[in-house]
Image (spheres, rainbow, N blue to C red):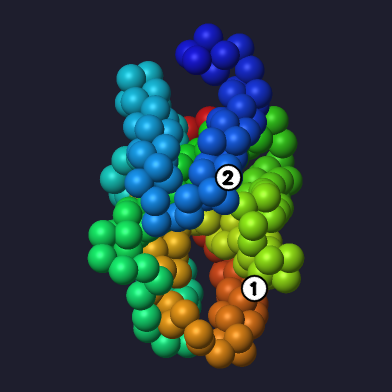
């Protein structure tokens, strides 16, 4: 794996994305997010990614380090933290019973870690070496969003998948911009995992209107947030 990384970082990133989809999509389709099989598969993938990064001392490159901003600069993250709660805007409920809800929540947190590492870490960082920042940000964000089309193969409805793609593209821009400007991926991992986990606490029969409100708020919020972030100095390019 290290030899592939050293020889072709882009191929390394793409293969991680393919591996992640190839392993998790069939399991999700057959057993669901709440299954022990899903949790085990995600745990193995997350452990593999972390072991590779830690073993090769790449924590700083991929933003797995303490953010060095000042206390007042935490305002930087407020819009993202507000949008993070959107899955609860339509009401609170529990998707599964007992231990299955726990499995689902942990799986969602692991997905946050894995997807941030492969899309913002591996993919975006190598794109930033090759392309101007706007292009690298756009490719990372759009690839992340379009990648959710594979949920069709897990049995997800067409309209739900289309909504999820636009939703994910908006979040992709937010996460990539925040990582690029702050140099810290932990905050993106935390928010991404929380968004996923809270989806398992959304009211099961909530009004569809709230889903569209959340999607619209996320898209509009992403546009305004990224315009604001453009004015901030970038931290990540110093690491490339």
Q: Earlier in the sequence, mark 2 or mark 1?
A: 2
The picture places residue 75, in percent across and down from the top left corner, at 38, 71
Give the vertical position of 1 relative to 29 (above or below): above
Q: Is residue 65 visible to us here?
A: yes
Give the vertical position of 33 relative to 10 (above or below): below
The picture places residue 231, in percent across and down from the top left corner, at 58, 62
Q: Is residue 142 visible to us here?
A: no
**Residue at 72%, 36% in the rendered image:** 131
The picture places residue 183, in percent across and down from the top left corner, at 44, 45
**Image marks 2 and 1: residues in contact by CB distance under 8 Å:** no
Q: Which mark is residue 219?
A: 1
Q: Nearer the viewer, residue 145 or 148?
A: 148
Quadrant of res 223: bottom right
The residue where tag 2 is placed is 25
Give the vertical position of 187 relative to 216 (above or below): above
Q: Secondary structure at mark 2?
A: helix
Q: Residue furthest front?
A: 30
Label 2 Cα crowd, 10 Å radius (few <14 / some 14-19 / many 20+): some
Q: Residue furthest top?
A: 3
**Residue at 26%, 59% in the rendered image:** 99
The picture places residue 25, in percent across and down from the top left corner, at 58, 45
**Residue at 53%, 9% in the rendered image:** 3
Q: Nearer the viewer, residue 36 or 159?
A: 36
Q: Secondary structure at mark 1?
A: helix
Q: Nearer the viewer, residue 64 or 159?
A: 159
Q: Nearer the viewer, mark 2 or mark 1?
A: 2
């Amino acid at each position: 794996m290290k030899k592939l990384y050293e020889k072709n970082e882009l191929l390394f990133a793409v293969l991680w994305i393919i591996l992640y989809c190839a392993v998790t999509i069939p399991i999700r389709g057959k057993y669901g997010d709440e299954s022990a099989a899903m949790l085990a598969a995600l745990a193995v993938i997350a452990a593999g990614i972390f072991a590779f990064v830690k073993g090769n001392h790449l924590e700083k490159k991929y933003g797995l380090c303490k953010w060095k901003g000042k206390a007042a600069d935490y305002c930087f993250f407020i819009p993202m933290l507000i949008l993070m709660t959107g899955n609860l805007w339509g009401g609170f409920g529990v998707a599964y019973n007992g231990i299955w809800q726990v499995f689902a929540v942990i799986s969602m947190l692991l997905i946050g870690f894995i997807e941030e590492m492969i899309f913002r870490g591996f993919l975006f960082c190598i794109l930033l070496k090759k392309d101007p920042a706007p292009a690298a940000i756009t490719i990372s964000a759009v690839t992340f969003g379009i990648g959710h089309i594979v949920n069709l193969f897990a049995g997800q409805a067409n309209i739900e998948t289309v909504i999820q793609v636009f939703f994910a593209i908006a979040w992709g821009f937010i996460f990539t911009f925040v990582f690029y400007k702050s140099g810290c991926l932990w905050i993106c991992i935390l928010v991404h995992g929380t968004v996923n986990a809270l989806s398992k606490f959304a009211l099961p029969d909530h009004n569809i209107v709230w889903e569209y409100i959340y999607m619209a708020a996320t898209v509009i919020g992403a546009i305004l947030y990224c315009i604001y972030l453009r004015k901030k100095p970038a931290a990540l390019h110093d690491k490339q």
